[in-house]
Image: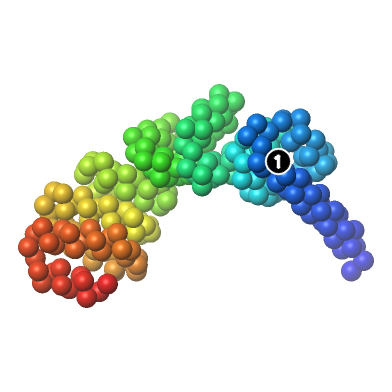
Amino acid sequence: MFGAKPKLLNSNRVWSKTHSAISSLAKLHNSSDPNEREVCEILKGLGDNVKEVDAEHVLHNITNPEIAILAVKYFQKKIEPERHVVLYNVLFKLFREINDFEKAEKVFEEMLQRGVKPDVVMFSTLIRCASVCSLPHKSVELFERMPSFGCEPDHNVSSSMIYVYARTGNVDMALKLYDDAKNEKWPVRAVAFSALIKMYGVLGNYDGCLSVYNDMKALGVRPNVTLYNALLYAMGRAKRAMDAKSVYQEL
């Protein structure tokens, strides 16, 4: 009973230091050219033995990418090298949130030169970042690099690439990944279903449009407005009034 108190006190001290660091870094947020020395001085307040979880927590609360890059650089000196990938994963998540693939790609290449091996989570984040930045060819490049790092696509990567390949007209790859996802019972996002329906519509395969729509309903994925619009447009082109009416009634 009494032995738990020192641990609790220590935990409170760590939390206090972490919160203080986050608050201090937030004051630098509006700086377009943050000073590395300032960032380091703030993070020194965490002490010499920085835990991975505390480093992650600090990084998750940084919204300025330049400050985040400097923080990762600092934490690399405190966290064991094989765990540096975790720090970069948080950093790339920020780049995805602010739609900055150009900077993410630059940092990724620098990371590889440092000898940090990417994982599936990182590839998933970068692929989605490229996709939301309307750079599907970059998503494809990243996807094709995964095997060279021993990374197998998971359901997040698969769903993202179904969307990318369908949007770029690579029918074979889009359908291959879609079949794989169904066989593995992986979840597929609504945007991927929408892209498949649009792809089938462009090809004039209107049965394919309905098949994907029915798959989606069977899997319990809730259609969005974009998907309904794509499906109604396809049914209109096919002059399939009854199917269009049926879809419209489900809106």
Q: What residue type is labelled 1?
A: Leu
Q: Can residue 99 be seen in this view?
A: yes
Farthest residue in the bottom direction? 249
Q: Is residue 82 visible?
A: no
Q: Is residue 244 above or below residue 173?
A: below
Query: Residue 126 at x, y = what percent?
Result: 46, 40
Q: Is residue 59 above or below residue 182?
A: above
Dividing the image into 4 quarters, which one contains the N terminus? bottom right
* Residue at image coords 21%, 61%: 231
Q: In which quarter of the image is residue 168?
A: top left
* Residue at image coords 29%, 69%: 218
Dividing the image into 4 quarters, which one contains the C terminus? bottom left
* Residue at image coords 10%, 58%: 237
Say which residue label 1 marks: 28
Q: In which quarter of the image is residue 75?
A: top right
* Residue at image coords 37%, 37%: 135
Q: Crowding at label 1, few (<14), some or many (≥20) Cα neighbours within 10 Å?
A: some
Secondary structure at numbered mark 1: loop
50 with respect to 87 (left or right): right
70 with respect to 4 (left or right): left
Query: Residue 246 at x, y = what percent?
Result: 17, 73
